[in-house]
Amino acid sequence: MARKLAALAHPARLGILRQLGSADSCCVKDLVQRAGLAQSTVSQHLKILVEAELVSFRAERQCSRYAINAPALRALAGVISQTLDHCCAGCCPQATHDAPSDPLRQPAAGHKDI
């Protein structure tokens, strides 16, 4: 799980994921044009995303096609949600749709806002 989260910790990789999410699959050339980064940089970021199993690739003629691994991202989102639920159980007020949120609310003493 830590490897997946670390892969998401770079703004360029988040941007690449967003780009991949808007298409079924992309080749590096397409991602380079959209990201405004060098081809080697995009390739390195894709390597990290593939190793973290958040992106898949398949060889296709002269280019490799990359795609989002949606089940892996959904599973990661579920783990993050469960972790936050567990960490905040009993100490964080539940948000309600009726009550307006108070942006000036201070966290309870000894508790950190996440």
Image: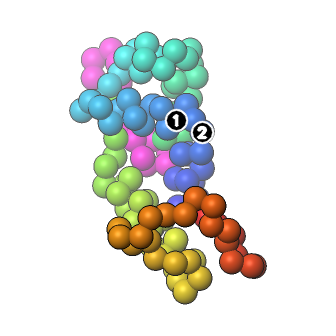
Q: Would you identify the image quadrant in which residue 71 lies?
A: bottom left
Above or below residue 45? Residue 8 is: below
- In the image, is residue 57 part of the stretch drawn in magenta? yes
How far across and down, in percent of the image, does residue 28 sit?
41, 20
Residue tagged 2: 10
Q: Which residues fall within the magenta stretch?
A: 50-64
Q: Is residue 60 visible?
A: yes
Q: Quick one: label 2, few (<14), some, or many (20+) residues within 10 Å?
A: few
- Amino acid type at mark 1: Arg
- In the image, is residue 60 part of the stretch drawn in magenta? yes
Residue 13's mark? 1
Q: Would you identify the image quadrant in which residue 26 lies?
A: top left
Residue in front for this viewpoint, 46 or 13: 13
Inter-mark Cα distance, 1 to 2: 5 Å
Residue in front for this viewpoint, 81 or 13: 81
Task: Report whether 97 appears left or right of 5.
Answer: left
Residue in front for this viewpoint, 112 or 20: 112
* Quarter of the rendering occupied by the C terminus: bottom right
Please name the residue shown 52% across and 78% down the image.
93
Q: Are marks 1 and 2 in contact (CB under 8 Å)?
A: yes
